[in-house]
Each structure stands twice: as C-alpha cells, then as structure tokens.
Image (cartoon, rainbow, N blue to C red):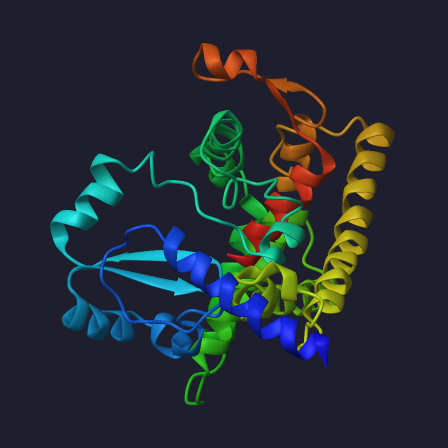
Amino acid sequence: MSLYFILPIFFFFFILSRRFRQKKFPPGPRGWPIIGNMMMKDQLLTHRGLSKLAQTYGDILHLQVGYVHITVVSNPAGARQVLQLQDAVFANRPAPIAVRYLSYDCADMAFANYGPFWRQMRKLCVMKLFSRRRAESWNSVRDEVDSMTRVVATSIGLSVNIGELVFGLAKNIIYRAAFGTSSNEGQDELLKIMQEFSKLFTTFNLADFIPWLGWVDPQGLNARIVKARASLDGFIDTIIDDHIHRKKANNYDDEGDNSDMVDELLASYGEKTEGNDSNDLQNALRLTRDNIKSIIMVSSKS
C-alpha cells in the first residue's frame, strides 16, 4: 500500500515543480502533463492546422510535444527574421532518431548542422557532384531520354502512361548517374530501400519527444531502422568496393566522361579538402565511407 501512496505524491510534486520552473513562452493551446500537445499531432503536421491555431493564439504561438518546445511563426515579418535576417541562428534543426541513425549521424549536407563540416560538404556538392561540367559529362544519361522518346514515338494511336514513363526516366537517370549502370535489379532493390527510408523519416516516433519512453516502441521502429540501414550498407558497400577495385585494376579516370557520383566521391575519400576561410582550413575534413554512403542515400532519395 505504501507504493500506491508514494507514487501520487511524487507525481504531484513533479508537476508542481515543473510549473514553478516553467519558462515564459508565447501563447498557445494548453497541453496535458508530460505529453503536452501531442494529442493534437494531426493539426501540428499540416500547414492548415497551424494556420487555424495562429488565428486563435496569434502570429507567434507556442506548442509543446512531449519534452520538445515548438514556436510557430505565421506572420511575414517574423518569417523574414527567421528565414533571412537571422537565418544562421535558426539554421540548425533537431534530427529525429531515425534521421540520425539512417544518415550515419548526419554525415551528409542535408541533415548536418550549419558549420565548417556543412560548408565543406556544400562545396563538394556544388563544385564536383552537381556542377555544370559534371552534368555535361553524363553523356550516357542522355541515352535514357532517347529511350523514353522512342517508346512514346512507337506508341502512336495508343494510350501512354506519361507519369509512369517520367518516373522510370528519373529513376534510370539517377541510378545511372550515381552508380554508372542501369541494372533493373539494382534499381528495384534501391527503390525498396529508399521507400522504407521515406516511411521511417516521416513516421511519428514517441522517443523523439519523450526519450525515456523509447523502450515502449509499439510500432517496432527500432528494429525497422536497424534493418533498413543494414540493407543500405550491404547495397552501397558492394558498389563502393566494386568502384575501388575497378579503379585499382584499370587505373580508372575519375574525371572521365564515364565517371559517376561514386567515382567523384572516392576521389576525395580520405583526403583533406580545403575550405573557404581560415576557420575551415583549421578544421579540414576527411571524406569517410559513411559520408559517401549518406550523400548517396540523400541524392537517391531526392
């Protein structure tokens, strides 16, 4: 009986202490203890839901989802402050558990925090991976456009699913530019992996908002995250090893017309890259295998 008596008292003092220590936040809907406004997640995940809340609580409102505090800015002046005038202050964003694990602890440009590492990765992407010279050198990719054009030309008088053709074209171009091949088997495997990644990135995970309840995991997300990354590791590690072996065996030219994204990344593998300022130079980064895999994952997913 003593346990039943102690627990309510402990819970009461816990809530009371939180209320006394609570910081001043903008107005917003009142939440429940511990979970906050988590029951309103259907409204929180849509711009229309947030717009309705702004009409009630003002252009700057506060929401609490578990232990995470959220400030929503809905007026143009506030958005300009956040997105333009003070963008460096608000550039970083908290990465959910799935994003951190599946991006190899934010080892790419898309999820990395703003700083020397992000600037190095951005320079690599702009000057090498997605430069104009690199796009013009992908002569083999134009074959995919010609192939789709021939399919349409030979279907005169027949109905053609343009959406399916365009999706197939984009898939072939991305795979061929990234890995230098158009293997249908490899494309299907990568597509399944990326579809699982997309689901895991957008699935609501209780542990992101109440960390000490992460062990509950009613959706089995922890096991799915580990399995998804293991699938990507097995897929991309094989491709990276093949490129390394081909380069050593044939003295492959990374700057040639037939080079792909993996070749470009391997050219900087383990080497220091120069930055744009003294701060970057003092924190010169090396491109690791995790960096390569994370960049390929984001590029393929995009």
Judged left or right of residue 138, residue 93 is: left
As drawn, 300 above or below 248: below
Front in this rendered view, residue 95 or 276 = 95
Front in this rendered view, residue 181 or 51 = 51
Residue ID at (50%, 56%): 302
As drawn, 61 above or below 247: below
Residue 205 visible in this rendered orientation of the protein? no
Front in this rendered view, residue 225 or 135 = 225
Residue 28 visible in this rendered orientation of the protein? yes
As drawn, 46 above or below 21: below
Judged left or right of residue 161, residue 74 is: left
Residue ID at (41%, 89%): 157
The picture places residue 39, in percent across and down from the top left corner, at: 43, 78
As drawn, 219 above or below 34: below
Residue ID at (45%, 70%): 33
The picture places residue 207, in percent across and down from the top left corner, at: 60, 63
Q: Residue furthest bottom?
A: 158
Identify the image quadrant of the N terminus.
bottom right
Residue ID at (43%, 35%): 132
Count of marks overlaid on the render: 0
The picture places residue 138, in percent across and down from the top left corner, at: 55, 43
Judged left or right of residue 114, residue 282 is: right
Write down the quadrant of residue 44 in the picture. Answer: bottom left
The picture places residue 178, in percent across and down from the top left corner, at: 62, 48
